[in-house]
Image (cartoon, grey):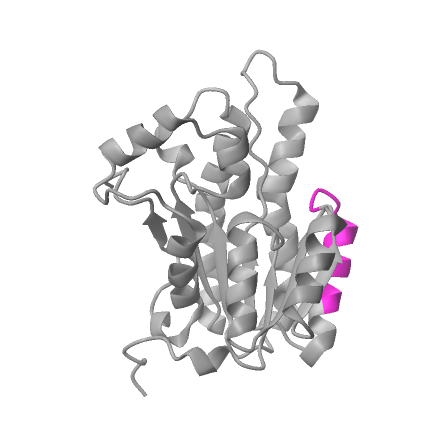
């Protein structure tokens, strides 16, 4: 049968999604959206004070797991929670990231390794652990959340930029390897998204003015701009999409 013209919201009902970093920012918005579509969502983070209230608010379809994604054994335990729900994982969204501003000369080897472990290695470990259950799933889709940062670079973010560049290569190769099994892997690279943390810690009024000036779309990007594209990539409407990078940045960076 040909793919549907648009995503069918009902296709998510009863399925299982695993979302890393799903308790705040982009991840929280995606967690909320998937639950609203009737999807079981196993989501993780490092802060119970964020994850537990969100799970309680969203109800029985939301499953919180505290997890440090720099620790492979904790990731494997996280995946096992998702697998126990129906015996399969239908969707995987590798989203969690850390983006501290650390100057190149000031950055230690330990800090660089931590950024790579959280922002890149965790994608490998999570996907590898989830693969046996993705093979049993119906959605059979992986979306890796990257960043446009590696395309143009930001001072003070060499470790973060290096990890995000690695996600691009990881996605391209993995899509080629898993495609014959019907498992799709795509990369969604947002621009500077106005999450609560970004607004509180990093975004100045001058930054906002600069974004508006340089974007084709004259509006600040929010998680609500990214989630619909993520859902489309997960859905059957995108069944011919794999190994691709989709940029959501209001047209700031014209590829």
Looking at the picture, does residue 105 appear above or below residue 92? above
**Quadrant location of the C terminus in the rendered image:** top left
Q: Position of residue 7 (x, y in %)?
A: 36, 75
Residue 23, position as x, y percentages in the image: 63, 53
For the record, the magenta segment spans 69-81
**Residue 236 appears in which quarter of the rendering?**
bottom left
Q: Is residue 86 left or right of residue 100?
A: right
Residue 94 appears in the rendering: no
Q: Residue at x 67, y 32 (%)?
A: 114
Q: Position of residue 78 (x, y in %)?
A: 73, 60
Q: Does residue 77 belong to the magenta stretch?
A: yes
- Judging depth in this view, the residue of 95 and 64 nearest the camera is 64
Which quadrant is home to the N terminus? bottom left
Residue 42 is left or right of residue 74, and the answer is: left
Give the residue displayed 45% in from the left and 37% down from the top. Answer: 165
Depth check: 222 or 136 in front?
A: 222
Looking at the image, residue 112 lies above or below residue 86: above
């Amino acid at each position: 049968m040909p793919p549907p013209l648009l995503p069918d919201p009902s296709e998510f009902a009863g399925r299982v999604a695993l979302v890393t970093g799903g308790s705040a920012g982009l991840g929280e918005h995606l967690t909320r959206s998937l639950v609203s579509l009737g999807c079981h969502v196993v989501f993780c983070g490092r802060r119970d004070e964020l994850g537990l209230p969100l799970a309680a608010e969203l109800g029985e379809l939301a499953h919180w797991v505290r997890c440090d994604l720099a620790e492979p054994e904790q990731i494997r335990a996280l995946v096992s929670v998702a697998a126990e729900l129906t015996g399969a994982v239908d969707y995987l969204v590798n989203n969690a990231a850390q983006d501290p501003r650390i100057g190149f000369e000031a950055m230690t080897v330990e800090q660089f390794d931590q950024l790579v472990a959280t922002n890149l290695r965790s994608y490998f470990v999570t996907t590898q652990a989830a693969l046996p259950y993705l093979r049993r799933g119906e959605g059979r889709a992986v979306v890796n959340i990257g960043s446009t940062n590696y395309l143009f670079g930001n001072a003070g973010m060499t470790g973060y930029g290096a990890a995000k560049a690695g996600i691009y290569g990881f996605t391209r190769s993995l899509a080629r390897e898993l495609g014959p099994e019907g498992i799709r892997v795509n990369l969604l690279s947002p621009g500077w998204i106005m999450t609560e943390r970004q607004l509180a810690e990093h975004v100045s009024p001058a930054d906002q003015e600069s974004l508006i000036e340089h974007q084709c779309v004259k509006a600040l990007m929010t998680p609500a701009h990214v989630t619909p594209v993520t859902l489309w990539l997960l859905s059957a409407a995108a069944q011919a999409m794999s190994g691709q990078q989709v940029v959501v940045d209001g047209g700031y960076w014209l590829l």
